[in-house]
Amino acid sequence: MAKEYDIVILGGGPGGYVAAIRAAQLGFKTAIVESKKLGGTCLHQGCIPTKALLRSAEVYRTAKRSEEFGVMTNEVTLNLAKAQERKERIVSQLYNGVQHLMKKGKIDVFEGKGRILGPSIFSPLPGTISVEMNNGEENEILIPKNVIVATGSRPKALPGLEVNGQNVIASDEALKMETLPKSILIIGGGVIGVEWASMLSDFEVDVTILEYADCIIPTEDKEISKEMQRLMKKRGIKVVTAAKVLPETLQKGDKIVVSAEVKGEIKEFSADKLLISVGRQANIEGIGLENTDILIENGFIRTNEYYQTKESHIYAIGDCIGGIQLAHVASHEGITAVEHIANNEPQPLNYSLIPSCIYSHPEAAKVGLTEEEARNKGYQIKTGKFAFRAIGKALVFGDVDGFVKMIVDDATNDVLGVHMIGPHVTDLISEAGLAKVLDATPWEIAQTIHPHPSLSEAIGEAALVVEGKAIHG
């Protein structure tokens, strides 16, 4: 028997389940169709499990240098199995929490593969959902007034370097490793590649990054990228930029061997494992888009600013539409879509206000424009930069590398961007995010009294540098 809903959401990740919660709050009868587990990639193969292991790496790194803090320990060893158990406990606790939220919101969850049907006896418009249930029971038919596609993404493949789950892996397989390799090649020096390089280096794996661009984390401010590369090399991570990997040279044996063209010269690299980390691609196959007029561009679903597709009653959010592929972005896109369905006239999401973070050692975080982007947009800018080395809390903490950089419009004095690299900057960036939302000036940020000693003092000091009024710099 067909079931009717106001909104049916394909995908239960941080975009889908947050959209479902907001829909339920607004009184919509709501259902989620999820083929795997609620929480999606973020909870089960992405944000949470990787950060749990990165935390284990941080503790291990700190324990090995505990004598610097006057704490004498016996020989420190890593128990990867224990770290993996801890990761799984965290994921399980959060998964249970998401399931509770669905019950609390009276949101129906269908565990199976959802597919959008074309016009049928159920509806003159495309959008009826057929669910192939995981338990093998008869397909469920859901008839929604509106659909939100939130099917997420998966690691992008490199032709000729196909993942086999053994010596050629992607992040999904890396999360399940029961033993650590002695060495690893990471193809791709973006956010995911850098986080894995940092973690595995802390776990005493010999790491080499091969990055096609002229620098690692190429979407970051150039000074942040340069500092990250310097500090990674300082830790013993080999970083090779301007490296065009040649898949046809791949050899699989006791070691993985592959060649890359590096600035016109062919160089050979070998390691126990090869980790592919070259971005993510949308999960849009097999969900019935061909039964609609929905447009696909460059492998992603095309939407308007309210996430409506060409079929106005079908919305799409999160990684499957491209853009900024982050969990918190998908969540806010989902809320905007639901608010638009409810005719609440939501403001379109301003992507320049969205912070993004890299959870490596050192951490990096940003909000707004890089210096290069600001100049390319025609801004006359002034900048302020303040090093953590001059911050008392950083010295106390034992982590003094990095800095805060502020980019300001010289004409209006508005903050255009803030970029950070150093200790706990993934937490500090929220102040910069609020400053962007409020169109703050460096003077206003400097007038905010930052407690002493705290790492946040670096933000106030960077603002003072812009004003030419540095106290400690």
Image (cartoon, grey):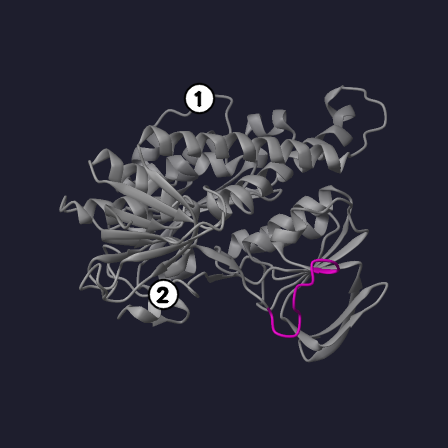
Q: What residue appears at the point 49 percent right and 35 percent down from the top-left corner?
A: 95
Tell me if residue 165 is in the magenta stretch: yes
The numbered mark, 1 or 2, whose residue comes first in the sequence reads 2
Quick one: SS at disc 2?
loop
- Residue 66 drawn above or below residue 263: above
Quickly name the residue at label 1.
451
Of discs 1 and 2, which sits in the foreground?
Answer: 2
Q: What residue appears at the point 61 percent right and 35 percent down from the top-left corner?
A: 88
- Decide if residue 303 is on the left or right side of residue 319: left
Q: Is residue 311 visible?
A: yes
Q: Amino acid at mark 1?
A: Pro
Q: How many C-alpha atoms fall within 10 Å of the one at disc 1: few (<14), some, or many (≥20)?
A: few
Give coordinates of residue 123: x percent, y percent: 20, 60
User: Of helix, strand and loop, which mostly describes the magenta segment?
Assistant: loop
- Decide if residue 370 is on the left or right side of residue 70: left
Q: Amino acid at mark 2?
A: Gly
Q: What residue appears at the point 45 percent right and 49 percent down from the top-left corner?
A: 137
In the rendered structure, which segment of residues is drawn in magenta?
A: 158-168
- Decide if residue 238 is on the left or right side of residue 452: right
- Residue closer to the observer: 454 or 32: 32
Quickly name the residue at label 2.
288
Quick one: SS at disc 1?
loop
